[in-house]
């Protein structure tokens, strides 16, 4: 199947979630596009969710687009339209001045899991290979960095072991800290269809809220936030006691079991149940479902990742697959769902401040040398760069002088938004590369660079099952907007760096593919030509084989650790979140709603998508609401030690008592910053992954009273 189809139709991939559904984009005579699901695409077979099916409205509506570069020479000046040359020349001059005066760590790039792989690649090459700092981080830090660390520690590398086709081969799904019915809908439809055809398939959902994913579940474990490690250990203990473990796998293909066994046997089931706020028999039932399964898939996302103990939660869950030997075989494996469309591609090019290209390690001198020689630039620093939240703190305290933000809206998406705002206020120089005139960050910009949107540029993305797809360019960007990779390369040339004179996006991809040769994610046989012909392939795709796959990893039971064995970690039970007390007695958790995406800069333009839920709200258990004398639709104030949010109350028995929920999407793009959940969230980080604790902070809630 070829990418370019007749009648001016083009193959592409949905630019929202990590499921990575294939779409066909048709360009009409008037330049507008229509989008439909690609019936031939293996991921979605023509299906699209509410967000994907409305993609064309976000593309066709250009009313909010940025059309030309703008700049101001000092913070008191208004922004003025300038040419690309002037904007990039001045930006390069400012960056050079800071680098000369304060060193390469005085500048940073903050990017996005929505960037194409080619964009990610050139930004990393620029800052790590030429500027000489590792200050590149992305909003993927907020999303899956705990899963990256978990996979690396357990399997030796950041590698999702399963493929989507394993769904139809599994007979037990343990879905924890995820609501795929709303957040990964097409993947979830495959799970639901499988369950409908095979009612004996068991689904367990672990969540403090009874979400739509629970509708298909055999068992909902309404867990107390923050207690996942205790639950996973309790299940591990039961699996051991019931003899439902794989001794051959444990003895021959893993290490660490004895210490793990000691750790999980420390706590009695009754105590674990009490800590987690669950019934003992429900935990026993979950262990029984897993123990009886021939194919066991654990699925997780932000509920585990966005936590002060996110890596521990990941490891304790992966342990369940390892002790039962449910990895590297059909219908089995620990499966982290990625939130963003190309978070995986970003990981492949080393797109976080602690990673290096092609899953190489920043702390490995041989790896640094390999990449440095390949790029021909400066010495790659061994010091990890600043992570997402750390960058904004460093702006606030003056360590960081300049930041370049692209494809992200950090003032709505970062935790403790006031702190992030403080950082941008104090920054000496801010570059914002954006498609839309709406994000709050623009207010703080010294230079605004208009970027091309989805369908206005070509490139590649990788979805949650390591499937790389080619996205066609359908139309020219409006005004003077340019593809993100081209902007970065033009800037690099203004800085005087060699190796950024690509004439085609395909050449960036080929360079990236060459750099993966000999690694575990080897795609050296891949080019745009191959991708256009095949439409998509799963890595690896080696040059000497020119074949895809294997699509399921670790079938040979050889892992990427030095010993080639998977590591079972005896994860300690720790609590690092903000504590509730008399003043802030409730636990706040945040998350997505079905029809909105991130900070709504795209989905917020589609009226149809507002019909599902049109405004921010606080979900609260009726018992808590009664105690606080709050009724449905009352305006309430949610206070934490950092700020406040004012929204209407939505009473729901589906949320656990003592826990309240705010959707993460709202901010100034639609509405005011008073409905921004991150006014109150905590910026406590997981010490290893540096992922923020979005799923746990202490708040109080009161009915709003006019002053
Ligand atoms: Fe797009 Fe994800 Fe919906 Fe598929 S499931 S259409 S990738 S938002």
Image (tube, rainbow, N blue to C red):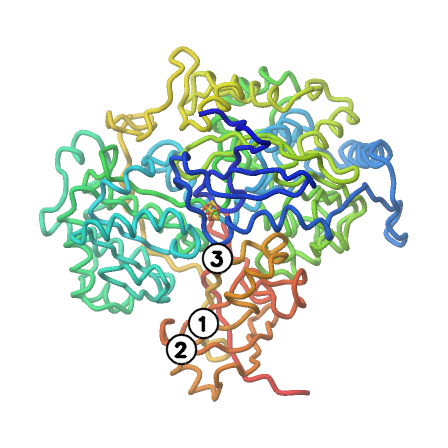
**Residue 560 appears in view:** yes
Of discs 3 and 1, which sits in the foreground?
1
Using a 10 Å C-alpha cutoff, classify the residue at mark 2 as few (fewer than 14 neighbours), some (14 to 19) or many (20 or more).
many
- Which residue is disc 2 drawn over? 621
Task: Please determine whether, in this image, residue 619 is positioned above or below residue 348.
Answer: below
Measured as percent of width and height from the top left, residue 605 is found at 63, 56
Q: Are marks 2 and 3 in contact (CB under 8 Å)?
A: no
Viewer-closest of 473 and 175:
473
Q: Is residue 580 left or right of residue 205?
A: right
- Cα distance between the residues tagged 2 and 3: 22 Å
- Which residue is disc 3 drawn over? 693
Q: Which residue is at a point 43% across and 87% down the rendered structure image?
A: 627
- Give SS at disc 3: loop
Q: Are marks 2 and 1 in contact (CB under 8 Å)?
A: yes
Q: Which residue is at a point 59% across and 51% down the rendered structure image?
A: 389
- Give SS at disc 1: strand
Using a 10 Å C-alpha cutoff, classify the residue at mark 1 as few (fewer than 14 neighbours), some (14 to 19) or many (20 or more).
many
Q: Quadrant of residue 471?
A: top right
Q: Is residue 80 left or right of residue 42?
A: right
- Cα distance between the residues tagged 3 and 1: 15 Å
Of discs 2 and 3, which sits in the foreground?
2
- Give SS at disc 2: loop
Q: Quadrant of residue 466?
A: top left
Which label belongs to residue 660?
1
């Amino acid at each position: 199947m070829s990418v370019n189809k007749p009648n001016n139709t083009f193959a592409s991939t949905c630019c929202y979630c990590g499921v990575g559904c294939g779409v066909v984009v048709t360009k009409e005579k008037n330049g507008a596009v229509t989008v439909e699901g690609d019936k031939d695409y293996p991921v979605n077979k023509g299906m699209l969710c509410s967000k994907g099916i409305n993609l064309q409205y976000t593309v066709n509506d250009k009313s909010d687009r940025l059309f030309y570069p703008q700049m101001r020479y000092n913070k008191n000046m208004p922004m003025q339209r300038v040419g690309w040359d002037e904007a990039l020349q001045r930006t390069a001059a400012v960056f050079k001045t800071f680098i000369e005066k304060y060193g390469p760590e005085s500048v940073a790039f903050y990017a996005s899991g929505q960037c194409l792989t080619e964009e990610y690649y050139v930004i990393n090459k620029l800052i790590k290979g030429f500027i000489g700092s590792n200050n590149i981080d992305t909003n993927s830090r907020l999303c899956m960095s705990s899963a990256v660390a978990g996979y690396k520690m357990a399997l030796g590398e950041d590698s999702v072991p399963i493929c989507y086709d394993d769904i139809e081969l599994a007979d037990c799904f343990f879905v924890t800290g995820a609501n795929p019915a709303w957040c990964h809908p097409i993947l979830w439809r495959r799970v639901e269809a499988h369950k409908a055809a095979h009612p004996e398939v068991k689904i367990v959902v672990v969540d403090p809220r009874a979400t739509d994913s629970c509708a298909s579940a055999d068992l909902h474990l309404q867990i107390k936030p923050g207690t996942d490690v205790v639950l996973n250990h309790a299940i591990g203990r039961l699996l051991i006691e019931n003899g439902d473990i794989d001794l051959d796998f444990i003895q021959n293909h893993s290490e660490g079991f004895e210490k793990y066994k000691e750790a999980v046997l420390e706590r009695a089931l009754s105590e674990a149940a009490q800590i987690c706020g669950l019934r003992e028999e429900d935990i026993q039932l979950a262990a029984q479902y897993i123990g009886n399964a021939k194919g066991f898939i654990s699925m997780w996302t932000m509920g585990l990742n966005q936590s002060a103990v996110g890596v521990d939660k990941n490891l304790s869950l992966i342990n369940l697959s390892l002790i039962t030997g449910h990895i590297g075989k059909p219908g089995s494996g620990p499966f982290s769902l990625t939130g963003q469309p190309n978070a995986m591609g970003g990981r492949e090019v080393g797109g976080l401040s602690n990673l290096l290209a092609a899953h190489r390690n920043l702390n490995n001198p041989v790896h640094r040398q390999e990449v440095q020689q390949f790029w021909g630039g400066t010495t790659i620093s061994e010091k990890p760069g600043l992570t997402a939240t750390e960058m904004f703190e460093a702006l606030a305290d003056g360590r960081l002088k300049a930041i370049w933000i692209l494809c992200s809206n950090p003032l709505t998406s970062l935790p403790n938004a006031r702190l992030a705002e403080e950082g941008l206020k104090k920054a000496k120089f801010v570059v914002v590369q954006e498609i839309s005139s709406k994000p709050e960050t623009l207010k703080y910009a010294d230079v605004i660079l208009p970027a091309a949107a989805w369908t206005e540029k070509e490139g590649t993305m990788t979805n949650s099952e390591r499937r790389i797809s080619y996205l066609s360019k359908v139309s020219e960007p409006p005004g003077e907007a340019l593809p993100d990779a081209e902007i970065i390369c033009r800037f690099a040339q203004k800085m005087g760096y060699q190796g950024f004179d690509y004439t085609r996006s395909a050449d960036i991809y080929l360079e990236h593919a060459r750099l993966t040769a000999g690694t575990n994610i080897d795609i050296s046989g891949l080019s745009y030509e191959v991708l256009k012909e095949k439409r998509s392939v799963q890595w690896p795709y080696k040059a000497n084989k020119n074949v895809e796959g294997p699509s399921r990893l670790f079938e040979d039971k050889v892992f990427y650790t030095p010993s080639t064995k998977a590591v079972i970690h005896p994860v300690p039970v720790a609590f690092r979140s903000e504590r509730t007390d008399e003043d802030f007695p409730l636990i706040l958790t945040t998350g997505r709603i079905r029809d909105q995406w991130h900070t709504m800069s795209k989905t917020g333009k589609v009226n149809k998508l507002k019909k599902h839920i049109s405004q921010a709200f606080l979900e609260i258990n009726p018992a808590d609401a009664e105690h606080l004398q709050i009724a449905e639709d009352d305006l309430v104030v949610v206070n934490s030690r950092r700020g406040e949010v004012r929204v209407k109350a939505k009473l729901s028995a589906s949320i656990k008592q003592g826990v309240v929920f705010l959707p993460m999407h709202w901010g100034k793009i639609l509405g005011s910053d008073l409905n921004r959940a991150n006014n109150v969230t905590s910026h406590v980080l997981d010490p290893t992954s540096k992922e923020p604790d979005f799923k746990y902070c202490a708040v109080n809630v009161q009915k709003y009273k006019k002053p």
